[in-house]
Amino acid sequence: MELKRLDPDDQRPEFSCGDCDLDEFYQIDSIEGGRQLLSVTYAVIDKEKIIAFFSVSNDSIKKEDVPRSVFEHIAKLIPREKRYSSMPAAKIGRLGITKDLKRNGYGTIVLDFLKAWFTIGNKTGCRFLVVDAYNTEEIKKFYIKNGFSFLTSTDKEDKTRIMYFDLIKFRP
């Protein structure tokens, strides 16, 4: 497998994960997100076929955006002298697996790659991965299985739920 950065001017190779919103992001929105410097999209390629794509951007977990108990729990993970009012994070903006290969472990492979990518060499100084996960049982179970936790309970009725993963748990 290889990883290819998809710059805004790059032609988007054919891909469908079967979710209209994710497919539209891949084909259209990822281009504008790249042009506006809001996100970077990557394709995971195997034998010249895109098997997955993801986009990432900078983010943070802000003290004022989460319940106090949650932020205190997160802050306790950091030595007192290094605590901030927001914790640096990388956001997985979108993640899609080609519909032919869903439920074959590729989503976990991509998440494990991202966990390693942001810990080995610590390229951006981020401590957490965050994702606005679709609020469906299947998607929530997928992220929980991969070590993510809910950031807050105030979004239980929303279309997406904010989840996070503490990268220190993954560091070799």
Image: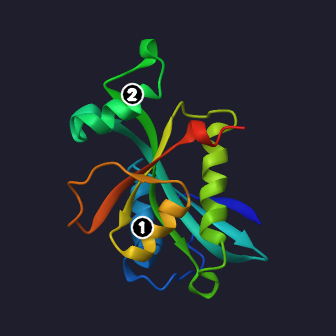
Badge 2: how crowded within 10 Å, few (<14), some, or many (20+)?
Answer: some
Quarter of the view holding residue 46:
bottom right
The residue identified by callout 2 is: 75
Residue 148 in sight: yes
Q: How is the image coloured?
A: rainbow
Q: Quadrant of the C terminus?
A: top right
The residue identified by callout 1 is: 140
Percent x, y for residue 112? 65, 55
Residue type marked 2: Ala
Numbered marks: total: 2
Question: Position of 20 compared to 153: left or right?
Answer: right
Residue type marked 1: Lys
Element at label 2: helix
Element at label 1: helix
Q: Give the residue at x 40% y 34%.
A: 74
Quarter of the view holding residue 89:
top left
Badge 1: how crowded within 10 Å, few (<14), some, or many (20+)?
Answer: some
Vertical arrangement, residue 19 with respect to residue 154, above or below: below
